[in-house]
């Protein structure tokens, strides 16, 4: 298994990407290709205490970098020798099994769609982050790739999320629900009504385990394994979850540091607090999969440190080994709505 890593993507590049990739290689035996400005990447390798490249690690030179200020829709075309573009072309050519980048989300999505291509029949690729819930974990699909959706997109997101939860998370018959403003069938706008009908039909046919509409609070309490949403709504939910997690941790920290008595209490539950912090830390997950792309592409958080990048590499390997893409390809006919056909 060989994972291609965009060494120049992210706020802490190239050091975090290189250090994380080396850790994944050393601890978990993952072969990696570091793509970026060779001299800078090599210096980062040396700063990690490696005088030469370890076995299973190689560098591919790319002279350009996609900056956050670049137009995401065209950056990968304009900067054809960027680490992002070169890495995606290596993936397309089969020189690696998955691609990881902490760079521009928009540029990565556009590049993955136009260079690596979507799975034939998939209308739009979706971002499928795994979020913590009271029941364990849930896949949120989509969380920002597609602000405007059709009912068919949402149907396909349901299938993509279900296959991902089954293959990658190991959940048997994952429960799928449509994110809405109420649990009742008649709630929501026209898009939700039409999507609900398609999802119910798929559920009644036994193709997915559709449980109906769900509100955000019920989803966070563990009522579902796959949350289906348009990218606009899904992104608001994701950012709300992240913000609430940070807020609660900050308030708990302030509370435990407020007096000698609470400081003593904090010492007694230090391990529990560490586990809670780990639960809401995006770096523990490592990255978000672009579901629907024909080869595995993982987006790491822009502020990822070395630990987060190492976890992103592990998620990429896990994704590549899962059989998810083969599942989607084998069942693509079930995911199409002929009356709503549109250009792929």
Image (cartoon, rainbow, N blue to C red):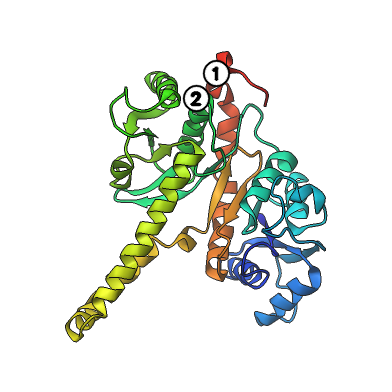
Locate residue 301: give its quadrant. bottom right
Is 199 in front, or is 56? 199
Residue 31: where, in percent of width, then height? 67, 61
Is 193 in front, or is 14? 193
Question: How many neighbours does mark 2 have within 10 angstroms: few (below 14), some (14-19), or many (20 or more)?
Answer: many
Q: Is residue 230 left or right of residue 59?
A: left
Residue at x 43%, y 49% (from the top left corner) = 238
Residue 201: where, in percent of width, then height? 41, 18
**Quadrant where the N terminus is found in the figure:** bottom right
Locate residue 328: give its quadrant. top right
Q: Is residue 281 left or right of residue 258?
A: right
Looking at the image, which residue sits at the far left?
261
- Say if mark 2 contacts mark 1, CB within 8 Å: yes
Of helix, strand and loop, which one carries label 2?
A: helix
Q: Which mark is residue 337?
A: 1
Is 62 in front, or is 11? 11
**Quadrant where the C terminus is found in the figure:** top right
Compared to 62, does 43 lie above or below? below
Residue at x 55%, y 26% (from the top left corner) = 331
Number of numbered discs: 2
Q: Which residue is mark 2?
A: 151
Q: Is residue 34 left or right of residue 23?
A: right
Residue 90: where, in percent of width, then height? 76, 51
Which of disc 1 and disc 2 is earlier in sequence? 2
Looking at the image, which residue sits at the far top?
339
Is residue 271 visible to us here?
Answer: no
């Amino acid at each position: 298994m060989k994972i291609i890593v965009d060494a120049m993507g992210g706020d802490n590049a190239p050091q975090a990407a290189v250090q994380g990739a080396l850790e994944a290689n050393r601890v978990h035996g993952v072969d990696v290709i570091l793509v970026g400005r060779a001299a800078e990447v090599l210096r980062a390798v040396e700063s990690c205490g490696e005088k030469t490249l370890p076995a299973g690690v190689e560098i591919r030179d790319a002279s350009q970098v996609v900056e956050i200020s670049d137009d995401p829709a065209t950056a990968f075309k304009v900067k054809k020798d960027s680490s992002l573009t070169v890495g995606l072309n290596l993936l397309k050519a089969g020189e690696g099994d998955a691609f990881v980048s902490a760079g521009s989300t928009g540029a990565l999505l556009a590049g993955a769609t136009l260079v690596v291509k979507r799975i034939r029949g998939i209308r739009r690729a979706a971002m499928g982050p795994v979020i913590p819930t009271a029941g364990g974990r849930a896949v949120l699909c989509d969380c920002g790739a597609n602000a405007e959706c059709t009912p068919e997109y949402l149907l396909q997101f349901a299938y993509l999320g279900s296959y991902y939860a089954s293959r990658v998370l190991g959940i048997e018959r994952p429960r799928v629900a449509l994110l809405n403003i109420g649990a009742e069938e008649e709630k929501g706008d026209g898009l939700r009504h039409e999507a609900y009908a398609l999802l119910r039909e798929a559920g009644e046919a036994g193709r997915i385990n559709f449980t109906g509409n769900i509100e955000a609070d019920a989803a966070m309490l563990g009522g579902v394994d796959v949350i289906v949403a348009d990218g606009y709504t899904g992104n608001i939910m994701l950012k709300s979850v992240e913000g609430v997690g940070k807020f609660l941790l900050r308030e708990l920290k302030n509370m435990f540091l407020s007096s000698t008595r609470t400081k003593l209490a904090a010492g007694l539950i230090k391990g529990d607090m560490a586990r809670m912090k780990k639960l809401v830390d995006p770096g523990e997950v490592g990255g978000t999969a672009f579901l629907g792309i024909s080869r595995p592409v993982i987006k790491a958080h822009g502020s990822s440190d070395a630990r987060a990048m190492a976890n992103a590499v592990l998620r990429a390997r896990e994704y590549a080994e899962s059989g998810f893409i083969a599942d989607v390809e084998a069942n693509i006919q079930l995911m199409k709505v002929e009356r709503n056909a549109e250009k792929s």
